[in-house]
């Protein structure tokens, strides 16, 4: 295994010493598809799904598509014709999608960003930075329902939302799609003649999920965006100056239990307001500001079972202010986790690109609340963030072909005293089509607040340390493997990130061989991975050895099976654990969306009691669409464990934990919907089997109803109701709080 002494200088040297000569191939060295020259629209184009507008008459046509899945860049089974055009304000794209049986088109109405792989959709993938690595997806289904996301060579994030228009129309021969993207929603270099990357894409799920692109996607290539077509012909684009101001007002009324516990009493109605502003002084720079942002429209997180977990659970960011240029905040070490900024009073953010250098900087005044992760070698704890802070995050990245070097800085200044500062370089080195090396080296210095009543280490002490992660991935058509090494000292902290483990060294290997048979299974990958983690003194924390296989099959199905042999430190003992880990999913018919089940079965470890046991976990979900407007999303999870008490011959149930969630959405149109969510969480334990006191039964129920109209993602009207309840000793669910709220926001654009 690589030692600390040899790795860290190598990592720093690669980050700072990379040069263009070392970082070949570049983004334009022949990896890309054919050039597409776009021309100005010859007339007006109305975005309504009708392709007979005069503006499409002389538009660039793209008729050559390739089936990248399940076939290997084969001629597609269905015909797709794309058109491209632009004018002074917009880029236009259209898809004409033939279908031999239009009755089988899967096109349910749904909320924005809810386009499953089991439905028909299409659109464009734009690389305006022209780096062959990052791009924005603008996709929509035959109803015009939009999906937009940012991809960083396969790491797709659908949290960001952009201003753009789309419309679909089902025809006698298939379906049409029209897309109109304002140049003000894009970031590009300030020059007259533009060269971008583009992929035109169609998803066609029938017996298999067919993916068709306008360029070949060679199997085994370590990048996705780099296969894009070259888009030329764009000139005279707007140089910036777009301003969007979105003020909002809210009204809410909360009902809480009376002081004597008898019934509920309503609090006085509360009124609030705030403002979101976005200004693009140039085509490559966006400046965002927010004053008293409101996140009441954000959907509640899907509950996760936290019983018998050693480390904090991760939840994705969903709040709009934090999502501009989100790809620039993604690094090998997750040192930026914007959900750690719990309740900002205000925030400012800039994101831009100049030549080959991209940057983003964010500052926010956080009221506090929520929790801070207190990491350790074999587990983490949470402490209440009962203080305000001024938070800063900045990152600059310089591209060198498909490689880059970057620098990250974060600073959390705690009200009343205390701070956490993190800085360091990261890099990506792509010497060949098959190989990619990524890494990051961070240093931190912390002065903890003097709040020992919240956490033992918050006594004003000073902590410092480093965190490093380097990963080498190799991928060819049949063989793939990856090597990773991590090194984190005990004193490293990233309070604005998600780093739940420190004080360890880790080595990881994963390798696989892919077969592509004919018939029911279209892809079969056999694999083996091993993971070895020790503390700073070399004592074992965990060890995993796991062979397995994964496959893609008919009916949009996927399966993965692992046989894990593990050793894990629990208390002062290293305990063995052997179990089977599995996941299955399929989408056989249009009215029945993806059915998925995952979990594990076999030996388990009680980390609190440091003892062995048996148990498992099963998580399942299914999407049912009784019609094109109604969607039912059902999810459930159960986890259990049995242990054998000392001196007894039979095992007994230690705990059982449940999560049940139903989300029902009735979408009237692409702009309006009604949504109901109900979620129940419960844990049942056997107190006699625990050394420390635990509740025999605890749980909660939450429900919400939302009526929404969205002209765009910032011009909205929300009317909602929420109900929270906690399980009582007698098994009832008395109300804990109820809330009725109204939000109105409108985006003024200039």
Image: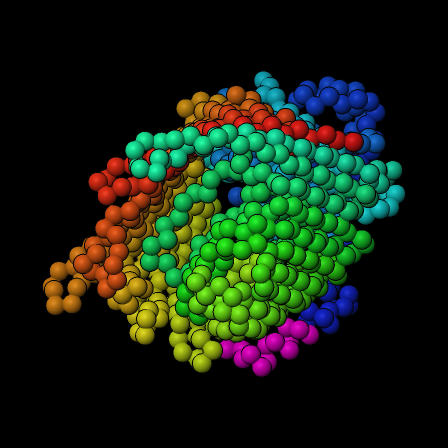
Count of marks, rendered view = 0
Colouring mode (rainbow / by chain / secondary structure / one colour): rainbow
| Residue 107: % across, % down | 53, 27
Q: Nearer the viewer, residue 729 or 201?
A: 729
In the image, is residue 38 above or below residue 383? above
Whether residue 115 can be seen here: no
Quarter of the image for residue 644 reads: bottom left
At which x and y percent is residue 238? Answer: 84, 37
Residue at 54% in and 67% down: 448
State whether residue 490 is above or below residue 26.
below
Say left or right for 720 vs 30: left
The quarter of the displayed image where residue 453 is located: bottom left
Main secondary structure along the magenta-highlighted residues? helix
| Residue occupying the point 58% across, 42% down | 319
Which region shows up in magenta? Answer: 1-13
- Would you say 664 lies left or right of 308 here? right
Front-most of 141 and 210? 141
| Residue 236 in view here | yes
- Image quarter where the C terminus lies is top right
| Residue 645 coordinates in the image, percent (x, y) | 17, 64
Residue closest to the far front: 260
**Residue 338 position (above or below residue 568):** above
Residue at screen point 77% across, 47% down: 285
**Residue 382 on the magenta span:** no
Please state the horizontal and vertical placement of residue 225, each as a whole percent of the image. 66, 49
Q: What residue appears at the point 51 percent right and 66 percent down from the top-left corner?
A: 450
Q: Does 164 sit left or right of 237 as displayed?
A: left
């Amino acid at each position: 295994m690589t030692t600390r002494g040899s790795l860290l200088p190598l990592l720093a040297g690669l980050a700072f010493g990379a040069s263009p000569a070392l970082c070949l191939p570049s983004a334009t060295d022949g990896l890309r598809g054919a050039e597409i020259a776009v021309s100005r629209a010859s007339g007006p184009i109305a975005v309504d799904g009708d392709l007979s507008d005069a503006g499409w008459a002389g538009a660039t046509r793209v008729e050559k598509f390739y089936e990248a899945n399940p076939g290997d860049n084969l001629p597609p089974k269905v015909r797709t014709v794309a058109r491209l055009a632009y004018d002074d304000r917009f880029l236009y794209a259209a898809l004409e999608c033939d279908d031999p049986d239009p009755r089988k088109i899967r096109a349910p109405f749904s909320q924005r960003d809810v386009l499953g792989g089991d439905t028909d959709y299409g659109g464009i993938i734009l690389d305006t930075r022209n780096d062959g690595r990052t791009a924005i997806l603008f996709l929509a289904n035959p109803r015009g329902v939009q999906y937009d996301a940012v991809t960083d060579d396969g790491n797709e994030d659908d949290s960001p939302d952009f201003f753009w228009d789309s419309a679909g129309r089902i025809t006698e021969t298939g379906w049409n799609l029209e897309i109109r993207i304002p140049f003000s929603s894009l970031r590009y270099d300030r020059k007259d003649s533009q060269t971008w990357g583009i992929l035109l894409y169609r998803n066609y799920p029938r017996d298999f999920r067919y993916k068709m692109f306008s360029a070949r996607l060679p199997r085994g290539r370590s990048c996705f965006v780099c296969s894009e077509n070259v888009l030329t012909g764009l000139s005279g684009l707007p140089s910036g100056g777009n301003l969007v101001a979105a003020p909002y007002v809210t009204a809410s009324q909360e009902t809480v239990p009376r002081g004597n516990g008898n019934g509920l009493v309503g609090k006085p109605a509360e009124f609030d307001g705030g403002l979101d502003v976005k200004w693009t002084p140039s085509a490559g720079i966006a400046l965002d500001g927010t004053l008293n942002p409101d996140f009441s429209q954000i959907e509640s997180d899907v509950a996760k079972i936290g019983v018998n977990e050693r480390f904090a659970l991760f939840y994705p960011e969903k709040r709009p202010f934090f999502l501009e240029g989100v790809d620039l905040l993604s690094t090998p070490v997750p040192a930026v986790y914007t959900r750690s900024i719990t309740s900002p009073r205000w925030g400012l953010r800039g994101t831009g690109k100049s030549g080959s250098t991209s940057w983003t900087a964010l500052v926010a005044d956080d009221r506090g609340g929520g929790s801070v992760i207190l990491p350790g070698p074999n587990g983490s704890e949470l402490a209440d963030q009962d203080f305000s802070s001024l938070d800063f995050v900045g990152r600059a990245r310089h591209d060198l072909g498909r490689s880059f070097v970057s620098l990250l800085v974060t600073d959390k200044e705690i009200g009343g005293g205390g701070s956490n500062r993190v800085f360091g370089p990261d890099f990506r080195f792509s010497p060949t089509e098959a190989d990619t090396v990524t890494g990051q080296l961070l240093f931190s210095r912390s002065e903890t607040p003097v709040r020992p009543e919240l956490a033992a280490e918050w006594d004003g002490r000073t902590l410092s340390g480093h965190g490093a992660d380097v990963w080498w991935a190799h991928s060819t058509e049949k063989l793939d493997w990856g090597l990773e090494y991590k090194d984190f000292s005990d004193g490293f902290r990233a309070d604005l990130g998600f780093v739940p483990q420190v004080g360890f060294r880790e080595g990881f290997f994963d390798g696989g061989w892919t077969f592509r048979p004919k018939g029911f299974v279209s892809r079969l990958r056999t694999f083996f991975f091993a993971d070895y983690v020790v503390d700073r003194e070399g004592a074992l924390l965990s060890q995993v050895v796991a062979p397995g296989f994964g496959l893609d099959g008919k009916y949009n199905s996927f399966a993965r099976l692992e046989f894990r042999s593990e050793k894990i430190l629990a208390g002062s003992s290293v305990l063995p654990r052997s179990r089977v880990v599995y996941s299955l999913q399929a989408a056989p018919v249009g009215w029945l969306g993806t059915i998925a089940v995952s979990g594990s079965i076999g030996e388990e470890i009680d980390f609190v009691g440091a003892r062995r046991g048996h148990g498992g976990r099963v998580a399942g979900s299914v999407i049912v669409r009784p019609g094109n407007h109604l969607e039912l999303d059902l999810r459930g999870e159960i986890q259990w464990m049995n242990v054998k008490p000392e001196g007894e011959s039979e095992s007994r149930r230690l705990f059982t934990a449940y999560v049940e969630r139903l989300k029902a959405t009735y979408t009237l149109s692409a702009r309006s919907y009604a949504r109901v969510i109900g979620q129940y969480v419960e844990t049942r334990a056997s107190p006699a089997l625990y050394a420390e006191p635990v509740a025999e039964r605890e749980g909660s129920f939450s429900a919400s109803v939302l009526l929404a109209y969205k002209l765009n993602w910032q011009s909205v009207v929300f009317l909602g109701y929420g109900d929270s309840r906690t399980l009582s000793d007698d098994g009832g669910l008395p109300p804990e709080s109820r809330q009725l709220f109204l939000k109105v926001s409108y985006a003024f654009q200039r």
